[in-house]
Image (cartoon, helix red, strand yellow):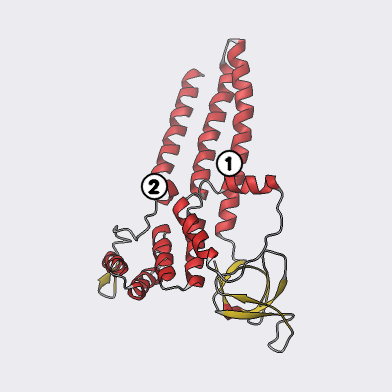
Amino acid sequence: MKRLLFILILTGLFAVTHAAEQTDSLSPESARMPELPGTEAAAPAAVGGVSSDELWNRANTAYINGDYHGAVEYYEEILSRGLGSVKLYYNLANSYFKEERLGKAILFYHRALRMAPGNDDVRYNLQVAEARAKDKIELIPEFFLTKWMRDVRHTMSCTAWSLLSLVVLLCALGLFLLYLLASRLSLRKAGFYGTLVAVVLFVASSWFALGERREMLDDTQAVVMSTSTAVKSSPDKSATDLFVLHEGTLVEISDRLDGWCEVTIADGKKGWLESKTIETI
């Protein structure tokens, strides 16, 4: 039985190590975002005669030289090839911000933050961009425990929480086997209570991982792209104007109908916007 325990632990460690190697590039802790775009190549693929790493270098050079419009075009070309990443979203957001296109900047900061929720640089730049948005909406008070749980969940990405849950599950297995096989009462007690704690941690980390994944796939959050747009009482251009939103404001989509979206803003106000005036995160 002791040999079986040893083999199971080694197998679990190998599986966790292999998962870490496969997901390391997705972890937000792998690199901190710089204030200026990095110089690493985005991808080695070549399309249309120009490789993506060459486009990446051109975009970085354009940004450093103050050609933010050119940087945006290069980054957008990379993005159109399906090569989205935290750094690409972050650099693109920086370029849009320098061009004073707040809607696009806030949109891509949010997309970067979804992939790396624990990245302080992305979060800080997002806050700076949002502070320049014209609409100052008062948030509805939130229960402190809900906010605390969300803040804890945002400290790591979905990949990191998933990896942690695997590690904790392995620990729970080892502790449970210790409880079953140990001859000393003190070790059996340690194994029993340790298993309970590990199971609780496994459930919590799995729940956080599912929450992060659900947020990454969420298509109900959007950013206003128009300089200003009237929110209507119904999905009709002739409907009554309820209030006006400006570029960069975050909204939540609750319904869609024939080119219109019913949206809710942070203070609870609700109305209809044309779909073309917003872009989903």
Name the front one of labels 2 and 1.
2
Q: In this orientation, does residue 260 appear?
A: no
Name which residue lies at 68% across and 88% down: 237
Q: In this orientation, does residue 133 appear?
A: yes
State the image coordinates of residue 207 (x, y, percent, origin top left): 62, 45
Instruction: Look at the picture and state if 91 lies above or below 8.
Output: below
Instruction: Look at the picture and state if 156 lies above or below 281.
Output: above
Furthest toward the top, the residue is 184
Secondary structure of residue under mark 2:
helix
- Quadrant in the picture for the C terminus: bottom right
State the image coordinates of residue 186 (x, y, percent, origin top left): 60, 12
Displayed quadrant of residue 179: top right
243, 257: nearer the viewer:
243
Instruction: Look at the picture and state if 119 lies above or below 169.
Output: below
Instruction: Look at the picture and state if 139 lies above or below 67.
Output: above
Question: Which circle marks residue 87 in the picture?
Answer: none
Which one is earlier in the sequence, the residue at label 2 or at label 1? 2
Residue corresponding to mark 2: 30
Asked if labels 1 and 2 touch by Cβ distance under 8 angstroms, the answer is: no
Q: Which amino acid does label 1 sit on?
A: Ser
Q: How many labels does the image show?
A: 2
Name which residue lies at 55% across and 74% down: 247
Question: Which circle marks residue 205 in the picture?
Answer: 1
Name which residue lies at 47% across and 59% down: 125
In-image side of 240 versus 21 (left or right): right
In-image side of 2 versus 197 (left or right): left
- Distance from label 2 to label 1 (Cα)? 20 Å
Circle 2 packing at 10 Å, graded few (<14), some (14-19), many (20+), is: few
Secondary structure of residue under mark 1:
helix
State the image coordinates of residue 226 (x, y, percent, origin top left): 55, 79
Q: Which amino acid does label 2 sit on?
A: Ser
